[in-house]
Amino acid sequence: MKLRIENFATLFLIAAILLNGCSGCGERENETAQGERFHNDLLHQDHDHHSNVKTKVPEAPEGDTFFKSIIFPKTPPYRPHGHFRYRKDPFPVPEFVQEYPDHFTVDEKGFWHVRLPTEKSDKLNHIPGELTGEAFRQKVVEILSEGLDTRTAAVVALKMGGLSEEAKTLFEKAISENPDDFQALRYWCGLNEAKKPVEVEVVRRRLVEMRPDSLVAVVGLGNHILNTHKEPREAIPYLEKAYRLNPDWHGPIFSLGMVYYRLGEYEKALKYLQASEVFTGPTDMSSLFIKVIKSKTILPEK
């Protein structure tokens, strides 16, 4: 069972897949061209593929001082077959990863992963066969939770996949134990984004108050406003700050493009989506909305 992910990128990825009628691995008509480009790309010392095709930096919208502050990369990372590949994780490694090194590992790009101790893996492999359904899931959670605080046990259960409801219960327990647990609150938001948007917004605003310079908190609130408000202009300062917190990451720039799209400021939206592509190369989502914007505004092809 797959982990349920509820965030801005996933929502628009689903939209792009549905509107394009493709499998999520890029538009079918471009698969051959993508494969040829992949083999012609340069493999740098950091083991990232960089596209030989440079995306032109768009001109800044008139009077937009923030756009002029964007630091564009000279060689954006290549995005093979529709799956975006970051050069490095834009988010810092959370503290619980460092607190429990026997349960997590961090790769050279800064991405962290669950790595269960051998004894836990053995216990999971020897769960009695007669346990099924909820009883089986509860036994799994019981094993995963051994030796961990409630919040970290919830994270492990969530990342293992198929245990989102059990993880949600654990996060709620962790919050009852410590109402100021930043990580528990942040993951609770992700699990309740769709069903409890009003409550989630209250918590996301609190997270920003708790850690004003946290990329997770700032971009989380900005994207929540974008996804849930009819008039999402309030998201702009949060997304601009999110970019300043990590100028190597394109995510806030793409989100700003979607804010301006939602506001009907199509030419400005186009500039931001094109700016995002300078970081990533063309993606299914950016290409889709660029086409939509051009059809709405009857912009000439460049």
Image (cartoon, rainbow, N blue to C red):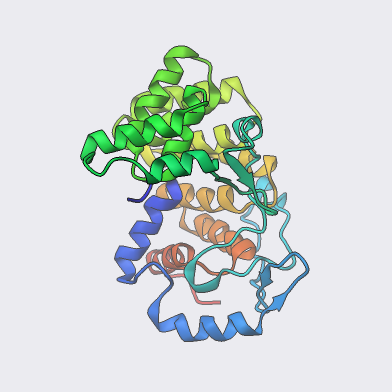
Give 237 or 24, whichever is nearer the viewer: 24
Q: Quadrant of residue 115?
A: top right
Counting the numbered discs, the total is 0
Instruction: Residue 241: give x, y in percent of width and height.
Output: 64, 37
Q: Is residue 291 left or right of residue 269?
A: left
Image quarter where the C terminus lies is bottom right
Q: Is residue 75 left or right of residue 20?
A: right
Q: Is residue 29 left or right of residue 117?
A: left
Residue drawn at x 27%, y 38% is: 136
* Residue 264, visible in the rendered structure: no
Q: Is residue 193 above or below residue 86?
A: above
Instruction: Residue 15: give x, y in percent of width and height.
Output: 34, 58
Residue drawn at x 39%, y 67% is: 24
Q: Is residue 11 above or below residue 81?
A: above
Q: Is residue 43 above or below residue 223?
A: below
The residue most toward the right is 45
Residue drawn at x 38%, y 33% is: 141
Q: Is residue 165 left or right of residue 108?
A: left
Give 270 or 104, whichever is nearer the viewer: 104
Instruction: Residue 108: give x, y in percent of width and height.
Output: 70, 54
Give 37 or 286, whichever is nearer the viewer: 37
Give 294 or 21, whichever is nearer the viewer: 21
* Residue 57, visible in the rendered structure: yes
Q: Is residue 101 above or below residue 200?
A: below
Instruction: Residue 277: give x, y in percent of width and height.
Output: 58, 64
